């Protein structure tokens, strides 16, 4: 970079970092991409909003006890060599093709089949590489009820240490507590990003030949969720603003029942004991279980839908959920904090539950090389869309591993061909000013007030109970929030830039609402029910009209949706 | 030892009727020359509130300038660890009962309020 240009950028921001490849996100996908890119002798910078291994949803994959990778059973034997690990034995009747078939069945045939092919054929090789890097496998099981033992289980705690060790052992410039806010582009190429060092509030720019986004989902749009606070849809939103496409944004997974009251229980999902004593009641005291089927799986589906229906019809309790009576007897599998709580919990006090969101099947549209529509911009892991179509059962950690490896590899190959990148000083100045606007506003909307409105809206309209009138109303509200409230967000407490929670929330909310608008548009457009997407006014799957993906792209300030044929 | 001013400079309350606790939070902003001092808040309490819930109540309703950490809310990421009534603990898994004194964990450089380096 010329000295004049560098000085020009330096005059605008507090720190300028030059690198070959910038990876954004400290979960499994981001770490794998960074290590892969570094192995091709590229200069790699990894920006993480929190800390490596403790960020995103990776620490919670498969529950707190163990994370689950997956590969076809035969490859677990022939490539991973884990025949005797137990408790289950790999089955040689399985194959990558059968595994692919199951992923497509589950995804209701709107998966991007080239991504699925990459998943099933590359998974064993890439998992093997993680094992060589020190990943310890604890068990082989039939995870997620797959037809053969395909679950490759690791200890969640070990996964975090493994990631930290691998990042530290490689020549990677690690920027922790550093939130990337937007991408830099020049002539339809991605040339870096701008962000905030959370602890100091300093604004930094990374100049990069290629960027990999691995920032996970946009769980922050929902109150009942298993996602950590930092999962706010930054990656999807910045990719969209840069000109990349989003796909399958209506496909949000709601399968688990989450505790939303008492407050300490928030974020915990749990397994109900499906006994005859289980009692869930709405605000009028009506029992919602009634004639639920008796076999556990059908009963679970029935009850989650019933909860969603009641919440959507404003029949929720004081805190918006359904009352769980006598929780002491019904909460069977809970996180550690619940055990302390339950000890002294009076039998007469109810909990409240809601159906929670745990995973996003949709996201940034990528091809099998993890390329987006923008040159030099790659994406990997949950932030991407297309792999799992309408529904995911197969492992998200394997998705992160395969996509992270491919993104790191292809970004490195691309970066090797680039001599230098051009920068747009005007864009950097504009983005910098946008970052500071919530700090500079002297009145307006507090982020927490907007967040509460968003949570109330999503719980009733964009969960597991969707219908046209609700979706139209929700879309109108979301567009209003984006147009009127977002520019008026302000930091009301302190103007200090250091760990300023309100400032970070203001910047995140803009991204979360962008994802929500894309999701609401797609949910309204898809007039059928398929996989995760349940339209109560269109309860059936309509293969004649909807064996398609919905793609969202930016046209000026407008969000445009198109139905496109499935990629085979 | 860090010098601490025990003077209460700020008592804020909101709402009524419910059981309330007094929460003292040790605050500072070293790089902006804000010395350590306790701010005191009155927080309405219900059964089953964690210390993180108490901090969130303060942040959301009484004083949004408060710097504290909350991310996974499940006792896993470990970034919310602070000193609670003299003992080091994760704020999100700690049930609150009675008045609280909340401080950053000892022997670490404070960034602002309850946030320290290296956690």
Image (tube, rainbow, N blue to C red):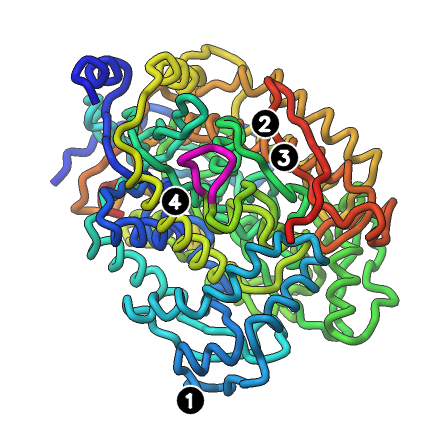
Q: Earlier in the sequence, mark 1 or mark 2?
A: 1
Q: CA separation, marks 1 and 4?
A: 35 Å
Query: Residue at coordinates 66% horizontally, 56% vertically from top-left?
Result: A391
The disc placed on residue A516 is: 3
Chain of the residue where label 3 is placed in the rendered structure: A
The disc placed on residue A207 is: none
Indicate the secondary structure of the residue bearing disc 4. loop
Q: Earlier in the sequence, mark 2 or mark 4?
A: 4
Q: Quadrant of residue A162?
A: bottom left
Q: Earlier in the sequence, mark 3 or mark 1?
A: 1
| Residues behind callouts 2 and 4 on a single chain | yes
Q: CA separation, marks 2 and 3?
A: 13 Å
Labels 1 and 2 touching (C-beta < 8 A): no
Residue range corresponding to the magenta coloring = A371-378
What residue would you read off at disc 1? A84
Labels 2 and 4 touching (C-beta < 8 A): no
What residue would you read off at disc 2? A450
Frontmost of labels 2 and 3 is 3
Residue A157 seen from this side: yes
Residue A201 seen from this side: no
Q: Crowding at label 3, few (<14), some or many (≥20) Cα neighbours within 10 Å?
A: many
Query: Residue at coordinates 55% horizontally, 48% vertically from top-left?
Result: A263
């Amino acid at each position: 970079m010329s000295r004049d240009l560098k000085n020009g950028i330096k005059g605008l921001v507090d720190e300028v970092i030059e690198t070959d490849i910038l990876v954004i996100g400290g979960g499994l996908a981001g770490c794998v991409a960074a290590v892969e890119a570094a192995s091709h002798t590229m200069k790699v910078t990894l920006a993480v909003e929190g800390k490596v291994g403790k960020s995103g949803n990776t620490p919670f994959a498969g529950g707190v006890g163990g994370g689950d990778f997956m590969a076809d059973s035969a490859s677990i034997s022939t490539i991973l060599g884990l025949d005797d690990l137990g408790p289950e034995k790999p089955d040689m009747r399985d194959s990558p093709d059968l595994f692919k078939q199951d992923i497509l069945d589950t995804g209701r045939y709107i998966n991007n089949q080239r991504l699925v092919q990459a998943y099933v054929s590359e998974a064993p090789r890439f998992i093997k590489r993680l094992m060589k890097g020190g990943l310890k496998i604890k068990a082989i099981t039939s995870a997620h009820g797959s037809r053969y033992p395909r679950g490759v289980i690791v200890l969640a705690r070990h996964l975090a240490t493994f990631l930290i060790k691998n990042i530290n052992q490689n020549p990677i410039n690690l920027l922790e507590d550093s939130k990337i806010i937007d991408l830099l582009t020049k002539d339809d190429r991605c040339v870096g990003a701008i962000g905030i060092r959370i602890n100091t509030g300093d604004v930094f720019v990374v100049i990069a030949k290629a960027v990999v986004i691995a920032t996970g989902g946009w769980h922050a749009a929902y109150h009942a969720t298993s996602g950590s606070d930092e999962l706010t849809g930054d990656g999807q939103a910045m990719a969209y603003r840069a000109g990349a496409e989003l796909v399958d944004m209506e496909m949000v997974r709601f399968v688990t029942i989450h505790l939303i009251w008492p407050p300490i229980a928030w974020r915990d999902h749990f397994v109900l004991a499906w006994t005859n004593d289980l009692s869930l009641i709405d605000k009028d005291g009506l029992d919602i279980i009634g004639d639920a089927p008796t076999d556990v799986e059908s009963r679970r589906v029935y009850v989650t839908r019933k909860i969603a229906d009641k919440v959507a019809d404003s029949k929720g309790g004081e805190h918006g959920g359904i009352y769980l009576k006598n929780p002491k007897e019904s909460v069977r599998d809970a996180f550690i904090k619940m055990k302390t709580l339950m000890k002294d919990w009076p039998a007469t006090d109810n909990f409240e539950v809601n159906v929670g969101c745990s995973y996003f099947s949709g996201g940034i549209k990528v091809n099998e090389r993890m390329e987006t529509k923008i040159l030099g911009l790659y994406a990997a892991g949950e932030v991407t869309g297309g792999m799992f179509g309408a529904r995911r059962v197969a492992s998200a950690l394997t998705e992160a591993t395969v996509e992270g490896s491919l993104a790191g590899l292809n970004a490195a190959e691309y970066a090797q061909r680039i001599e230098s990148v051009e920068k747009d000083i005007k864009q950097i100045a504009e983005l910098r000013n946008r970052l500071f606007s919530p700090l500079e506003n002297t009145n307006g909307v507090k982020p927490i007030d907007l967040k509460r409105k968003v949570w109330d809206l999503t719980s009733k309209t964009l969960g597991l109970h969707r219908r046209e009138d609700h979706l139209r109303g929700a879309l109108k509200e979301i567009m209003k929030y984006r147009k009127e409230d977002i520019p008026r967000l302000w930091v009301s407490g302190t103007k200090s830039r250091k760990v300023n929670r309100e400032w970070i929330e203001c910047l995140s909310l803009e991204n979360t609402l962008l994802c929500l608008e894309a999701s609401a548009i797609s949910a309204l457009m898809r007039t059928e029910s398929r996989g995760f997407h349940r339209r109560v006014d269109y309860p059936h799957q309509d293969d004649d009209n909807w064996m398609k993906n919905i793609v969202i792209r930016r046209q000026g300030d407008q969000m445009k949706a198109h139905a496109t044929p499935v990629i085979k | 030892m860090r010098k601490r001013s025990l003077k209460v400079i700020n008592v804020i309350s909101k709402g009524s009727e419910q059981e309330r606790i007094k929460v003292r939070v040790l605050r500072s902003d070293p790089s902006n020359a804000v010395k350590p001092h306790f701010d005191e808040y009155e927080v309405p309490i219900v059964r089953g509130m964690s210390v993180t819930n108490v901090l969130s109540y303060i942040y959301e309703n009484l004083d949004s300038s408060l710097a504290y950490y909350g991310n996974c809310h499940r006792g896993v990421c470990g970034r919310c660890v602070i000193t609670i009534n003299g003992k080091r603990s994760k704020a999100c898994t700690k049930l609150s009962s009675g008045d609280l004194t909340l401080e950053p964990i000892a022997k670490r450089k404070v960034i602002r309020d309850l946030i320290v380096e290296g956690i």
